[in-house]
Amino acid sequence: MFRRTLPLLALALFTLFVARPVAAQTPAPTLTDLATALDAVATALDAGDSGGAVVQLAKASQVWPTVEGEVASSDPAAYSAFELDLGTAAAALRAAPADVAAAAAAVARMRATLDPFVQTTATYTAFDAAAILLREGLEALLVLVALLAFLRRSGHSDKRGWIWAGGAAGVFASMLAGFALQAVFSAASAGHNREIIEGATGILAAAMLFYVAYWLHSKARLGAWQAFIDERTGQALAGGSLLGLATLAFLAVFREGAETVVFYLGMAASISLSELLAGLALGTVALVVIAVLMLVFSVRLPLQIFFRVAGLLVYYLGFKFVGTGLHALQVAQVLPSTPAPVPDVLFLGLYPTWETLLPQVGLLLATVGGLLYLRARNQRTLATQSA
């Protein structure tokens, strides 16, 4: 049993290795840091310590330039009000004598302005983190199980070791890719570049997710999935090369591992450490349980339901990645921000700007069109087979 589930346990360990350097890197100042600094200013003013208030306000002023884009892209009016009150508070404290009442009123207004943004800083949840690991791990697992089943049906059960060797190599290569991408991401994500890289990574992750979702729906029929596996495995065996079998397993695992790296890097800056770890733990436990059921007890997943549910889940994550990725580019002032009459719905990655909303609407329409096309194609295939 341990030998059979070892590749899946290694895949789960790999995600923890990827998440560890993401969580350990020195984070840039956040809106929460700014709120903490403002609270310190208010505390000093309440105690009548105008000198301490000046020091704390200076700290808040240093944090503000690194986070102001996030406020400006979501609510230009709130951004302008905060800037005005920041200047008012500084001027009141510089007066001789210091106008403590005016400074306290300005700080209170700034804190009230900032509060809605602080409450919604963490965009991704443990559910999102778990969904990525579970979906990617399950797809790799399904490929490995299908390859093993094909070997058993074709009388080549003695070649199963090549499948496991290829899968293990895929996990190892995914670890190397994870460390390499994380090193590049950390080195380049300082200051202004941080938001640009986060936005670009989010858009790349969204594109990959929509491709994966389309592929999942195209294989939603059991016959299509079996034909896909039989064709690939048959080609490898026909070539007389056992290395071909290992390559199939390697590519299946490495593709999912590389995608997992990109997805986690895309959400790393917008998820709290506790949510990330909770999601990884939940996804790992679920993945290992399913692996044991399939590999040890030969339990079969209802493939049609799995592909459809997994496809819808991936569409949701892709929709969210598009919104958060474009929003990060707005924060970096790469994209403009035009207010739109929609609410903030961070669970969906929805922001009240036309620059984020219109691409999401376009993708939603394209998704519906793609699903209708696949449905019509499947109906034509079934009609042809029954004729």
Image (cartoon, grey):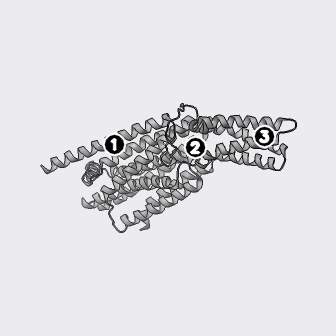
Residue 123 x, y percent position in the rendering: 54, 48
Residue 357 x, y percent position in the rendering: 46, 37
Q: Is residue 255 left or right of residue 380?
A: right
What residue is shown with label 1?
368
Residue 290 x, y percent position in the rendering: 40, 63
Mark 2–mark 1 CB contact (< 8 Å): no
Mark found first going from the N terminus, 3 or 1? 3
- Badge 2 amino acid: Ala
Taking the spot 15% from the left edge, 46% from the top edge, the residue there is 384
What residue is shown with label 3?
102
Q: Nearer the viewer, mark 2 or mark 3?
A: 3
Q: Nearer the viewer, mark 3 or mark 1?
A: 3
Provide the secondary structure element on which disc 2 rests. Answer: helix
Taking the spot 42% from the left edge, 49% from the top edge, the residue there is 256
Does 225 appear above or below 81?
below
Taking the spot 58% from the left edge, 48% from the top edge, the residue there is 120
What residue is shown with label 2?
183
Residue 141 x, y percent position in the rendering: 38, 57
Mark 2–mark 3 CB contact (< 8 Å): no
Provide the secondary structure element on which disc 3 rests. Answer: helix
All told, the count of numbered labels is: 3
Mark 2 and mark 3: span between their CA atoms? 47 Å
Hey, which residue is sitting farthest right in the picture? 97
Mark found first going from the N terminus, 2 or 1? 2
